[in-house]
Image (cartoon, rainbow, N blue to C red):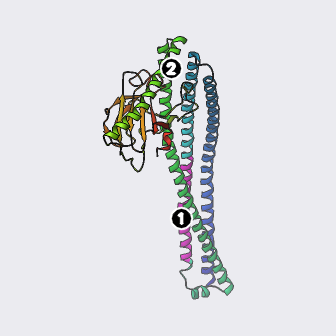
Amino acid sequence: MRKYPKIRSLFWFLGAFFLLFLVTTSARGVSEDVVNGEIRQLNGEIRSNQELLERLDRQKKEYSQAISQKRDEAKTLANELSIIDNRIAKAEIEIENTKAQMTEVDLEIKRTSIEIEEKTDKIEKEKRDIGNILKLIYRESDVSALEVLLLNDSLAEFLNRVKYLEDINKEMGDSLEELKKLKSELEDKKAELDVENENLVKLKSELERNKLALKDERQNKDFILAETKNSEKEYQNLLAAAKKEQDNAAAEIANLERSVRLKMESLRKDKIELNENGLIWPVSGRYITTYFHDPEYPFRYLFEHPAIDIRSPQGSPIYAPASGYVARVSLNGTAYGYIMLIHGDGLSTVFGHISKSFVGDEEYVVQGQKIALSGGLPGTTGAGRLTTGPHLHFEVRKDGVPVNPLEYLP
């Protein structure tokens, strides 16, 4: 009669263990099928979006090639308008491209979120499984070794029961290892999600910049048509006037460099110490539209571009990149407007296409001080004739010679 409680206990133990295994395995199978189905669908959407991005990239390259080809041809009004039209089309493609990139990142975020949810569910299941296994072990180990021996007919049966307990212990050990692995994967997925969210924020900013670029290009085309009245003769007159304006400004800046430094020396103002961190960016944005001596500069046939152009909405604040003296504020109607600052170590800076100034000649300014507002919108104050939209023309000169500003900026 004593065998029955032992047998019932053993059957209960084996049955419970087997049922636990079936339930957890089945639940995992159903859950993983659902999650895998969602991920497969998202992967399909991501592939389709990547094909769209490839198509947009090809179109963008075609417009870039068309722009380069037209730049190498004669400088006529027709060619200039063709270049602008291609730039408008390219800007539109860039907007679509950015939207497609945002869609891709959004899909990646959804996929990562599903994977995070899946890992979280698995962690909870592993915790429950470990809890159930611990309960089984506790139930079986609640009897002393002597009692277990007395309840079994032979040492062999006792050792068999010990073997079952060892199997459960191994199962629990495996579950703990799985739990650690899932936790590590979950942390990695959350880190991936943070990166994707940061990318999405950057893409949204890029989208706004591209929209502004498109608006600028359209305004530039309207300005050229209005100024030339669609006349080739008027266009050539515009180019000649623009070159003369730029040459005069360049000569004036070069003369100012020498005369102002001589004056500063006589006034003992030549010992301006540069901040140990060097120059700071003069505007909040850092999106460069034209580089120093840029081969893609549209007016390179007139002169080399001695600066970098930083995209800035009309009326953006301009800050002194270093402490120094104001050598000149030149602002006269729609003609090219600029401010020139003299700094220590033979450096000077020039800020072109300003629309408003907050400083005057010979005034001392400190690093980070607001000195002006940016411009560049064709036909507005300080824009000048050689402008293709709102931006800051930023020059750095060393001993009077233009140098690459990017070599001095952080």
Q: Is residue 130 magenta?
A: yes
For the residue pair 56 and 9, the one nearer the viewer reads as 56
Image x and y of residue 30, in percent: 61, 54
Give neighbour class at mark 1: few <14, some 14-19, many 20+ (Cα, 10 Å): few
Q: Does the magenta stretch include residue 359?
A: no
SS category of the residue bearing label 2: helix
Instruction: Provide the residue span drawn in magenta.
Output: 110-139
Residue 344 to residue 124: above or below: above
For the residue pair 197 and 392, the one nearer the viewer reads as 392
**Residue drawn at (63%, 44%) of the image:** 43
Q: Residue 249 carries which label?
A: none
Q: Which mark is residue 221?
A: 2
Q: Which mark is residue 128?
A: 1
Q: Nearer the viewer, mark 1 or mark 2?
A: 2
SS category of the residue bearing label 1: helix
Image x and y of residue 72, in percent: 63, 24
- CA gap, disc 1 and disc 2: 68 Å
Image x and y of residue 125, in percent: 55, 61
Q: Can you name the residue that lies furthest to the right here?
A: 156
**Can residue 137 be seen?**
yes
Screen quadrant of the N terminus: bottom right
Question: Which SS does the magenta portion mostly show?
Answer: helix
Left or right of 375, for residue 94 = right
